C-alpha cells in the first residue's frame, strides 16, 4: 500500500473516530438521570442509614468517559472519625449486606453482594431508570484512579476521543469481559496512557513524576496520601505544553496503538507503568508476577496487576489487534473492526 493510500485511510479513520466518539458520548439526559440517582441514593442513606456517610462518584461517569449505557460507580465514604479503620474488617463487609436489604426495601432490582471481587461490591439496578449501579464501601483508591484518568484526559483533546473508540472496539470484539478472563476497561485505559507516554514525541507526561509534584501535598485531598498508599500526582494545569507538540492524527495514534500492543510490545520483558512514564522492565515489579502473561501496574496500588488475562486470552487479544491493523490498512474503515462477536471465554 502506498504512502498516499495510508495517509488517506488514516485521515478517514480520524474523521470516523471523531464521529463515533460524538455519537457514543453520554447525553445530557443521561448525565441528569445519573445525577438525580446519586441524589436519591444519598437521600436513602440520610434517612435510613445509622452512620454518617457521603456518596462519591467514580469510574467512567466521573472521568468524562461514560456512555448512556454505562454503569454508575459509587463509593460510600464513612464519617471522618471512622476513616482510619481497616476497611476490610468483617464489620465493614457486613455493611454491604445491610445495604442490600435497605436497597431492596426501596424497590431496587437485582440487588446482590459480589463477594469474590478484589473489592467486594453491592450491585443493583435502579427501578426508575434501569441504570446499573456498583457500590463499594470505603474504598478510596477508586476515587483517586478516576481523578488521575480525568486529569490525563484534560491534557490533550485527542485522548478522550481515542478512549471512547478504544472502549467501543474492545467491547465489540469480545475482549473486554474481565469476568470471562479478558481485560477491563480500566486496564485498556492504562495501556493507552502508557502508549501515549512512550511515543518519540509523547502525547502525555507522567503526572506522577516526582519532579512535577509540588513539595507540599494537601492531605487528605485530590493530591494527598491515603492509608499508606501514595496517591500524589500533579494537576495538569501546572504543566506547560510540550514543545514540540506531538502532531499525530487520531487515526495514526489508533493504528500505532494497535500495532504496538499487537506486535511490538515485549510482553515477556516489559510491564506497563504510567506511574513511571510508560514501561518498566519486568525485573522492577513484584516477583510474584513473573508468570503473568501481561503486567499492567496499577498507578497507586503497586502490588496490583490490573491485567489478569491468561496467556491464551492475551494471544486472542493480540490477534484481534493485528487483524484490526490489517483491516484498517486495507481501507476497510472503522466500521469493519467494530463488528460485534460473542465475548471470548477461557
Image: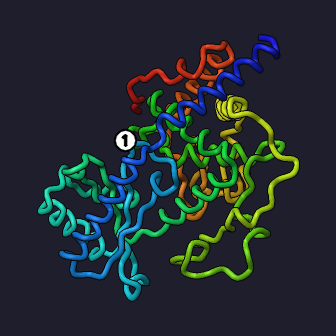
Query: Which residue is the site of mark 1?
Result: 69
Is 247 left, or right, of 191 in this rendering? right
Residue 121 visible: no
In front: 311, or 58? 58
Place of residue 231 in the rendered image (x, y in percent of width and height, measured from the top left): 59, 70
Would residue 14 appear left or right of 319 to someone viewing this image?
right
Q: In the drawing, does residue 30 fall left or right of residue 63?
A: left
Q: Nearer the viewer, residue 309 or 343?
A: 343
* Image quarter (top left, top right, bottom left or bottom right) of the C terminus: top left
User: Residue 174 occupies which quadrant of the picture?
Assistant: top left
Q: Position of residue 336 (x, y in %)?
A: 54, 18
Query: Given the current orientation, which residue lies at the most extreme right position?
Result: 244
Q: Position of residue 297 (x, y in %)?
A: 60, 54
Residue 185 in percent (x, y) is at 49, 44
Q: Pick the quarter of the image with the N terminus.
A: top right
On screen, 131 above or below 254? below
Above/below status of 330 relative to 86 = above
Mark 1 neighbour density, 10 Å: few (under 14) some (14–19) many (20 or more): few
Residue displayed at 55% across by 62% down: 147
Q: Is residue 174 above or below residue 239?
A: above
Q: Residue at x 40, y 29 (%)?
A: 343
Amino acid at each position: 500500500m502506498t504512502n498516499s493510500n495510508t495517509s488517506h485511510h488514516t485521515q478517514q479513520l480520524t474523521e470516523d473516530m471523531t464521529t463515533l466518539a460524538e455519537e457514543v458520548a453520554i447525553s445530557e439526559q443521561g448525565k441528569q438521570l445519573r445525577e438525580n440517582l446519586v441524589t436519591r441514593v444519598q437521600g436513602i442513606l440520610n434517612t435510613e442509614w445509622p452512620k454518617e456517610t457521603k456518596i462519591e462518584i467514580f469510574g467512567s461517569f466521573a472521568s468524562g468517559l461514560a456512555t448512556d449505557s454505562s454503569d454508575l460507580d459509587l463509593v460510600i465514604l464513612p464519617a471522618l472519625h471512622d476513616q482510619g479503620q481497616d476497611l476490610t474488617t468483617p464489620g465493614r463487609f457486613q455493611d454491604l449486606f445491610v445495604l442490600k436489604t435497605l436497597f431492596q426495601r426501596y424497590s431496587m432490582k437485582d440487588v446482590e453482594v459480589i463477594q469474590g471481587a478484589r473489592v467486594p461490591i453491592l450491585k443493583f439496578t435502579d427501578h426508575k431508570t434501569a441504570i446499573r449501579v456498583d457500590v463499594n464501601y470505603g474504598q478510596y483508591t477508586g476515587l483517586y484512579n478516576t481523578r488521575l484518568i480525568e486529569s490525563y484526559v484534560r491534557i490533550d483533546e485527542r485522548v478522550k476521543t481515542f478512549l471512547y473508540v478504544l472502549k467501543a472496539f474492545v467491547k465489540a470484539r469480545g475482549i473486554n469481559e474481565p469476568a470471562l478472563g479478558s481485560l477491563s476497561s480500566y486496564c485498556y485505559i492504562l495501556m493507552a496512557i502508557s502508549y501515549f507516554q512512550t511515543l518519540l514525541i509523547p502525547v502525555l507526561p507522567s503526572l506522577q513524576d516526582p519532579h512535577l509534584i509540588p513539595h507540599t501535598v494537601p492531605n487528605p485531598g485530590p493530591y494527598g496520601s491515603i492509608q499508606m498508599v501514595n496517591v500524589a500526582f500533579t494537576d495538569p494545569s501546572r504543566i506547560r505544553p510540550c514543545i514540540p507538540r506531538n502532531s499525530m492524527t487520531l487515526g495514526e495514534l489508533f493504528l500505532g496503538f494497535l500495532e504496538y500492543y499487537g506486535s511490538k510490545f515485549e510482553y515477556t520483558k516489559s510491564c506497563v507503568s504510567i506511574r513511571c512514564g510508560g514501561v518498566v522492565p519486568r525485573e522492577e515489579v513484584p516477583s510474584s508476577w513473573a508468570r503473568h502473561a501481561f503486567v499492567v501496574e496499577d498507578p497507586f496500588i503497586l502490588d496490583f496487576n490490573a491485567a489478569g488475562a491468561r496467556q491464551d486470552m492475551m494471544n486472542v487479544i493480540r490477534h484481534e489487534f493485528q487483524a484490526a491493523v490489517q483491516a484498517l490498512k486495507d481501507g476497510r474503515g472503522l466500521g469493519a473492526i467494530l463488528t460485534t462477536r460473542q465475548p471470548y471465554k477461557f
